[in-house]
Amino acid sequence: MKISIKKLCTTAVLMALTICATAFMSFPVPNMQGAYVHPGDIIIFLSVVLVGPYAAVVGGLGGFIADFIAGAGVYAPATLVIKALMALICYLIVRRKPESFGLRLVGMAAGALVMVAGYFLYEWALTEQLAAAGVSSLFNLIQAVVGVVPAWLISPLVKKLHLA
């Protein structure tokens, strides 16, 4: 598989933006060590529109690095897998009809649900407390909305600008 220089550079820039939006624009979740809400998922979801399957690299590696920078290294291994899967699931749905605004919402929502479920399972394994994992999931649902809604709303503009 051959990747164009433009797509490679776009992927690298999106990964850097994901790191910055995640690590430096985050808000800590009270009483949840290492947990935070951030706009980085907006970049990950928009990367699906811009670089297709390479969004998995943007999400996985970008989130992984951001976790270490933000002091949440305990989540980094999970983030590597969860954010990559989040982007990949979104891409697999969106690629069927990339111009569909509605299908983009479905893809982003599906990716967000993968994120919520993934962190729920990781938190449960980490703490061995179902209740703690459940509480964490509430904040991850907020994170999902913070990522999906803005990304979905601006995705047509981003797609148009990218093609210009």
Image (spheres, rainbow, N blue to C red):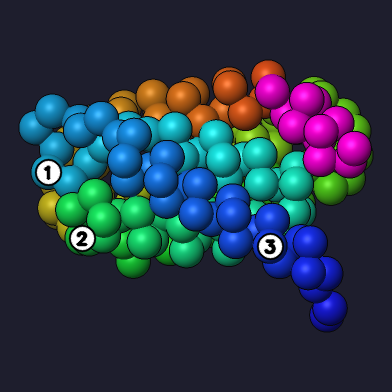
Q: Main secondary structure of the magenta part?
A: helix
Residue type at the position of mark 2: Val
Looking at this rendering, what residue extends furthest in the bottom direction?
1
Q: Nearer the viewer, residue 144 or 67?
A: 67
In primary-sequence order, the first of circles 1 and 3 is: 3
Element carrying mark 3: helix
Question: What range is drawn magenta here?
Answer: 154-164
In primary-sequence order, the first of circles 2 and 3 is: 3
Residue drawn where x is 80% and y is 26% of the image: 156
Q: Nearer the viewer, residue 41 or 96?
A: 41
Q: Which residue is mark 1?
A: 33
Q: Is residue 155 magenta?
A: yes
Element carrying mark 1: loop
Report the side of 53 relative to 72 (left or right): right
Residue drawn where x is 90% and y is 37% of the image: 164
State the image quarter where residue 116 is shown: top left
Residue drawn where x is 14% and y is 38% of the image: 32
Callout 3 environment at 10 Å: few (<14), some (14 to 19), or many (20+)?
few
Q: Which residue is mark 2?
A: 74
Marks 2 and 1, how far apart at CA: 10 Å
Residue type at the position of mark 3: Cys
Q: Is residue 89 magenta?
A: no
| Mark in front: 2 vs 3 | 3
Task: Tell me, yes or no, whether the two marked residues, 2 and 1, touch with CB atoms within 8 Å.
Answer: yes
Residue 79 lies, in percent from the top left, at 39, 57
Marks 2 and 3, how far apart at CA: 29 Å
Callout 2 environment at 10 Å: few (<14), some (14 to 19), or many (20+)?
some
Report the side of 54 relative to 27 (left or right): right
Task: Tell me, yes or no, whether the two marked residues, 2 and 3, touch with CB atoms within 8 Å.
Answer: no
Residue type at the position of mark 1: Gln
Q: Which residue is mark 3?
A: 9
